[in-house]
Image (tube, rainbow, N blue to C red):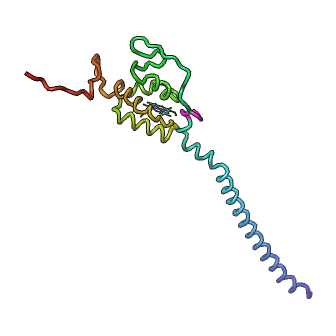
Amino acid sequence: MNNVPDKQPSNQAKNQLFNSLTKSVAGLAILVVLLLGLVLLVVFQPEISKRFNATTSETSPKNPEPLTDFTTELVDGKDVETGLLAGEGLELVKANCTACHSSALILQNRFTREGWHERIVWMQETQGLWELGGNESIILDYLAANYAPEAPKGRRVPLTGIEWYELKD
Ligand code: HEC
């Protein structure tokens, strides 16, 4: 008989203990899951950012460098291998501009000298194109002369930098 009133509070205490235990276990589990997520995110961060920047790595080789072993054979004023027009700087363009992609990207485009320069800067900033140094102006001259907008059909590119002389009577 004496046992009954005693039992009641101790049961309650047990329940309370059980309740707070399950609560803290649940809290701990949530914390562990969150921490695990954070750790995974840090560990796989390079993988994740690679996926978001997929365009950069698809076309560019890992360690691109200028081509060295090629021969240039001209037929009908064009390089047989690449279809690029003959002209001063052709070899430099072949070496530097067909290492990552085919010459088609040049052949199908027409830009002014500034336009070509912008593309080169873009490739240097985002695609791993190396510094062209002193070759840059030769390459730009070649591109501007041969692949300029509204390239005249059947006519040579107009001469620039001519020193005109006065006619005397
Ligand atoms: C390091 C690698 C690399 C080299 C070297 C390189 N390119 Fe590119 N170029 C790229 C990539 C990557 C693209 C984007 C291709 C694509 O969109 O599929 C590109 C695109 C282009 C385009 C198209 C741009 C547009 O706006 O559509 C042109 C034109 C071009 N390159 C010209 C050149 C010229 C000229 C050179 C030499 C000075 C050169 N490339 C050298 C990587 C390179």
Residue closest to the far bottom: 2
Q: Is residue 57 left or right of residue 113?
A: right
- Residue under the image location 42 percent in, 27 percent down: 106
Of 105 and 66, the residue lying toward us: 66
Tell me which corner region of the image, top left, top right, bottom left or bottom right, holds residue 153: top left
Residue 130, x across and y down, in percent: 51, 36
Is 109 placed above or below 12 here? above
Image quarter hosting the N terminus: bottom right
Main SS category, magenta section: loop
Does 63 sit left or right of 143 as displayed?
right
Viewer-side residue, 143 vs 119: 143
Name the residue rendered at 62%, 47% in the picture.
46
Vertical side of 46 occupied by 114: above or below = above
Residue farthest to the front? Answer: 168
Region in magenta? 58-63
Q: Is residue 37 left or right of residue 5?
A: left
Residue 68, relative to residue 133: is it above or below?
above
Quadrant assignment, res 26:
bottom right
At x 58% / y 46%, what residue is drawn?
Answer: 49
